[in-house]
Image (cartoon, rainbow, N blue to C red):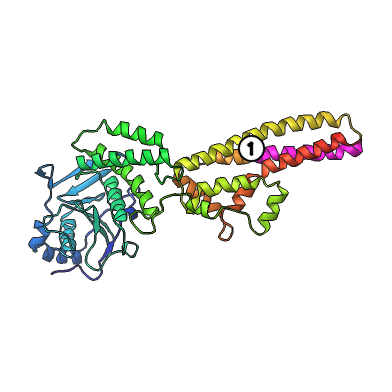
Amino acid sequence: MSSLPASYTLSPKTPTEFDRFTPVHFVKIDSELVSALAAIAQNPLARSTIAVSINDSTRSAGTIIHPEGGPILYHSCIVSTQDLTDAHVAIAGHILGQCERPSDNAEITVFLYILGRQIDYYVVDHESKAILWASGQVPESFKGATRAKHEHEYWIHMENFPGPRFSTSEDLRLLKEVLASNAIDALTSEGSTSPMSVQQIQTHLKSLELFSSSGDVQQTYAVARLWNLILQSRVINKYGTPEARMDRFISITDNPPAFAGAYASVAKLMFKRPHAHLGRCSRAWADRIAYTEEWRKFKTTNEREWKQIMALACVLVIASLLASKQRNCLYRISLHTALLMALVSAASAYFLLDESQNLGDHAADASTYFQEREEILYGVQRIAIVNSIPQALLIWSFIFFVLSMFCP
């Protein structure tokens, strides 16, 4: 079989590695590649294997607009964000000739993206919902991949390219069943691994009822987005393997979080206030996996606490100022200390509140938050200490205020 010039390389990619938001590069084909492609094009495989039936009609070439606004270009079963040329068709035929497909008449899609002398590609088998590559070119990250991982990458592809091959009525039916199952699981189990809350699932199911049995670009995009959320959770929780994580809090139950080293001493000086925050952090980042619902609960609880601390600190500041006018200079030291701590408590609470309110509300935002702040040795312990500073300072401020009141 004819091959590509040595200076050109086929680069196997996964759908995750393709960023549809990056600017599209213009394809420039040099004479060396043209000659090689001319030989490849003579191979009947290059023409026979890239015809695909879509909705009972064969579409040779065209453009579809992605729901987000970008163009999707297709030529038979080839898709890309680049203008597709005869070079793409010949390269697709070359790749398909080296792929081990379940059957010759399998419904497939070939993704191609030519960047200089590098040809990024992957092949999608729609029947098995699997990602394929040329023989011997399976990416390292995909060796031994689970079924859930293949399906996750499949739906990432469908989200990136929700046409000309659309989702099916069976995809929609199965999605509704899985969502309903997840809703019951989330409603009856605190440690549910469902990536969505019951309220979110109800909203999604209501929206899905508006779709018809025949798919289109909009429906395919929506179905793919929801499947991605479900399958991402399955991959993270090792779904379908002996090591499957069936309760997201099992590690916390078996090994309750506790402070260690210097943090243990600091926590005692802070009246063990950090222990509550350590529990919150551990639940929001259990096994270093973030869930949108748990993250929102984490933010809401913290923000409510910091608002209460700011209000109480202001009351204590006013009380300290009033009391200082009735005390001699010696005992004003305790009041001034109480005043200073109350001010710092309010300021730190405001800072943490402002920071929290500027964070996103999704699992990806939680991952960024914890990854930027956690430590290799102590995990989220430092985060818990920092988040409890306003409360600890308020308690110390109140102690100094009370001492000044009982002093003669």
* Image spot of residue 221 (x, y percent): 28, 41
- Relative to 206, is 348 on the left or the right? right
In depth, the one of 68 and 5 nearer the eye is: 68
Q: Mainly helix, strand or loop, the magenta region?
A: helix
- Please indicate whether residue 366 sits to the left or right of residue 79 in the image: right
> Which region is colored magenta?
329-349
Q: Is residue 337 magenta?
A: yes
Percent x, y of residue 239: 35, 53
Tell me the quarter of the image containing the C terminus. top right
Q: Residue 240 falls in which quadrant of the image? A: bottom left
Left or right side of 248 for 28: left
Looking at the picture, tell me which residue is in the foreground, 4 or 78: 78
Q: Amino acid at mark 1?
A: Tyr
At numbered mark 1, what does the secondary structure look like: helix, strand or loop?
helix
Q: Is residue 272 magenta?
A: no
127 or 184, which lies in front?
Answer: 184
Mark 1 = which residue?
A: 350
Check the picture and name the quadrant holding the N terminus: bottom left
